[in-house]
Image: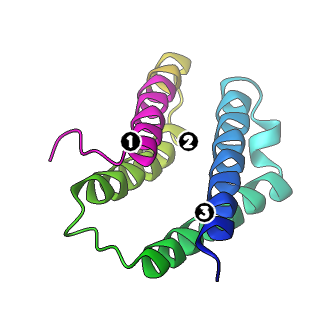
């Protein structure tokens, strides 16, 4: 497989994943109708699965180990945090708490993007 093709596919899937995250998050701030839509729900999870698969393929093609590349380890940790924050946020009832989780998750997404672009560890 061509590295650049997989990389660009991974980036496109990442953008779609983020868009679906915000669609579902903003929907939950309102009526929640879109977030409860089966196509949006399943599409979001399918997109995230494809994102994970493309990330694993990229690591395999580039032969990089997250235990040797601290920026990648940080990115993986932040992706786990992003998933956890999304799950916790989806269960919240108060709008103010939902907004707080949305802001924190947005910061996490920005940090993931920064790591992806700079390939320089921020914390480790």
Residue at (20, 69) in percent of width and height: 67
Badge 2 is on which residue? 90
Residue furthest to the left in view is: 124
Could you say where residue 102 lies in the image, as x and y percent from the top left? 51, 28
Instruction: Specify start and end residues of the magenta stretch as a single range.
Output: 101-124
Q: Which label sits on residue 12?
A: none
Please say if 13 is above or below 114. Answer: below
**Counting residues from the N terminus, which is met first, the one under dot 1 or under dot 2?**
2
Badge 1 is on which residue? 118
Tell me if label 3 and label 1 are in contact, CB under 8 Å. no
- Coloring applied to the structure: rainbow
Q: Is residue 80 left or right of residue 99?
A: left
What whole-number distance in Å separates the C-alpha atoms at marks 1 and 2? Answer: 31 Å
What main secondary structure does the magenta stretch of the protein show?
helix
Residue at (36, 52) in percent of width and height: 75
Give the quarter of the figure containing the N terminus. bottom right
Residue at (32, 58) in percent of width and height: 72
Residue at (43, 75) in percent of width and height: 62
Determine if the magenta segment contains residue 121: yes
Closest to the observer: 108 or 64? Answer: 64
Neighbor class of circle 2 (other Cα within 10 Å; few <14, some 14-19, many 20+) is some
**Which of labels 1 and 2 is toward the front?**
1
**Counting residues from the N terminus, which is met first, the one under dot 3 or under dot 1?**
3
Determine if the magenta segment contains residue 103: yes
């Amino acid at each position: 497989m061509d590295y650049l093709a997989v990389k660009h596919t991974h980036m496109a899937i990442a953008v779609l994943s983020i868009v679906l995250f915000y669609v579902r998050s903003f929907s939950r701030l309102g009526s929640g109708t879109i977030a409860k839509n089966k196509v949006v729900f399943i599409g979001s999870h399918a997109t995230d699965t494809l994102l994970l698969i493309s990330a694993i393929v990229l690591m395999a093609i580039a032969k990089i180990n997250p235990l040797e590349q601290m920026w990648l380890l940080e990115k993986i940790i932040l992706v786990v945090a992003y998933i956890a924050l999304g799950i916790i946020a989806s269960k919240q009832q108060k709008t103010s708490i939902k907004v707080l989780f949305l802001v924190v998750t947005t910061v996490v997404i920005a940090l993931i993007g920064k790591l992806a672009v700079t390939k320089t560890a921020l914390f480790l």
